[in-house]
Amino acid sequence: MKANKAKLLTFAEKCKNVLASNWQGHLNTIKADAKGSKADIYTSKVKYILKRGKPYIWVPEKELHNVNTIIDERASFSVTTPFPGPLATLLRSIKKLPTRAALTGDVVPYKDVKSAAESLREVLLSEQNAISESSYTVSGILSSSNLHNTSRGENLKTLLEGDENSCVFIDGNGGTHEVDFEDMNSSKVDRLAPLSARIIDGINQSEARRRGLMLFCLMYLNANTKDAYMLSIDRKGFDVLGKISGPLSKDGFGQYQWREYRFSLKEEARDPETFCRQLVEMEEETVKLVSSSSGLG
């Protein structure tokens, strides 16, 4: 496998995957009263589902957004890539931002409550079916994750119980990339995306899987990492955050820094099953490479 020539998704595809992998985001509307719009912005976290590529946002009845959008429909909606478990602690410690998708436009009321609830049930059922039909390998990774923090379905269940448009992809370094809405509409969501948070956390919670990531860095990229975490996954490959030796400090002691590494899959992962199968094959391949290089093969 050649990881140095990584195949990447378009920014539109990345935005779609961010929206499909999460279930909540920050909605921003312009504060308003009986006299009209104000200059201040009101922000709160709301839940949503993605239906045919569009976010359908659930706004609680008493939320100020409902009043604001009656006077001024303009709004923005920001969603981040989920980064649960040990990955969240690591990203905070190195002050690295998660990738995000930012949408701006008008908030339009959706009055067909029955249809919205049915769409939500379809989303939940789809996730349940994907999990129930998964193999032993996929089930093992998913079961290692923190269900409450990573399951879109678990977090959306409570919803059943209870002029200028733009889209921007914001990478982990804070760089912004404008995305054409036509590209967004034509881009397909990875079937990996709805379960990506659970898969990533399941891998990162396993010391054996993380040792596998360290071997990937060593054998494929000649990067001697001291630790590694799965950062993101998509149908074309995955990104790993590896801890490597940095330059010596003034007192002569070595320091460590975290660097991103991209790995391409041999074939596009059409679903979690295909992704996990290829991950296992890569683990087996690197073990063989290590054994042969050490004269044990």
Image (cartoon, helix red, strand yellow):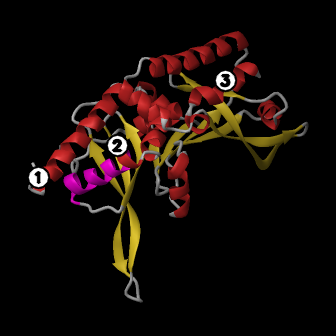
Q: Please, which residue is most extreme toward the bottom here? A: 251
Label 2: how many residues lie within 10 Å, few (<14), some (14-19) or many (20+)?
Answer: many
Q: Is residue 225 above or below residue 98?
A: below
**Which of 231/224 is in front?**
224
Please say if the residues under marks 2 and 1 sit with CB atoms less than 8 Å apart. no
Which residue is found at the position 90% from the left and 39% from the top?
Answer: 35
In the rendered image, residue 154, in percent from the top left (x then y), is placed at 62, 28
Q: Is residue 217 magenta?
A: yes
What residue is shown with label 1?
A: 296
Q: Is residue 246 above or below residue 119?
A: below
Q: Amino acid at mark 2?
A: Phe
Q: Amino acid at mark 3?
A: Lys
Q: Quadrant of residue 247?
A: bottom left
Q: Quadrant of residue 58?
A: top right
Q: Is residue 269 magenta?
A: no
Q: Secondary structure at mark 1?
A: loop
Q: Quadrant of residue 200?
A: top left
What residue is shown with label 3?
A: 157
**Which of 60/297 is in front?**
297
Q: Earlier in the sequence, mark 1 or mark 3?
A: 3
Q: Which mark is residue 238?
A: 2
Left or right of 162 in this view: 258: left
Magenta span main SS: helix
Q: Please, which residue is most extreme toward the right here? A: 34
Which residue is found at the position 15% from the left and 49% from the top?
Answer: 289
In the rendered image, residue 257, in percent from the top left (x then y), is placed at 40, 68
Which quadrant would the N terminus be assigned to in this image? top left
Which residue is found at the position 49% from the left and 29% from the top?
Answer: 194
Stretch of the chain drawn in magenta = 209-222
Q: CA distance from mark 1 to mark 3?
A: 52 Å
